[in-house]
Image (tube, rainbow, N blue to C red):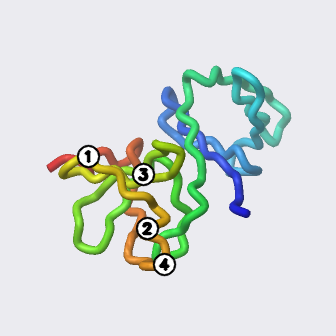
Amino acid sequence: MRTIKFRAWDKEEKRWIDLNGMDTEFKSCLSPGKVYLISEQGVLRQIPLEEVELEQFTGFQDKNGKDIYEGDIIKYSDDEPNVVIFEECCFCCKLKYNNHLLRLQILEGKNKYEVIGNIHENPELLKS
């Protein structure tokens, strides 16, 4: 059984929110309609879900052991960078050159793909 975990990108502050425990500034949890951030000093801050981009862990890791999430940009062997998405009931790599979907399960075991960034912090990786 795969691990279920999420990450969230704060669209306004342009930073990751740790939804799975402690990060350097906040302990957080997910609640209907809002993400609640509780600082170590006990200060509560609410962020509406429309102000964050929630991305799920795929259950796969790249060749370096890094967790792969939706929104990650991966490079397979010598191919161009491609985005990881959830579509057609599975996690896929959307191929840049023809928009076809390649299931991550097909790539698993080959261990030739690598997370080189994500769509929030490294959008320039997708420009050609």
Which residue does the numbered mark 1 point to in the structure image? 99
Q: Are marks 2 and 3 in contact (CB under 8 Å)?
A: no
Query: Quick check: 128 above or below 78?
Result: above
Query: Quick check: 68 above or below 35?
Result: below
Give coordinates of residue 121: x percent, y percent. 40, 46
Give coordinates of residue 47: x percent, y percent. 65, 24
Mark 4 closeness class: few <14, some 14–19, many ≥20 residues within 10 Å: few
Q: Residue at x 75, y 29 (%)?
A: 36
- Sequence-wise, the earlier of marks 1 and 4 is 1
Quarter of the rendering containing residue 79: bottom left
Q: Where's the N terminus, which quadrant?
A: bottom right
- Sequence-wise, the earlier of marks 3 and 1 is 3
| Label 2, label 4: how far apart the Cα atoms are | 8 Å
Residue 109's disc number? 4
Which residue does the numbered mark 3 point to in the structure image? 84
Query: Quick check: 27 above or below 3?
Result: above
| Label 4, label 3: how far apart the Cα atoms are | 17 Å
Residue 106's disc number? 2
| Amino acid at the residue labelled 3 | Val
Quarter of the rendering containing residue 110: bottom left
| Amino acid at the residue labelled 1 | Asn
| Label 2, label 1: how far apart the Cα atoms are | 17 Å
Q: Residue furthest left?
A: 128
Mark 1 closeness class: few <14, some 14–19, many ≥20 residues within 10 Å: few
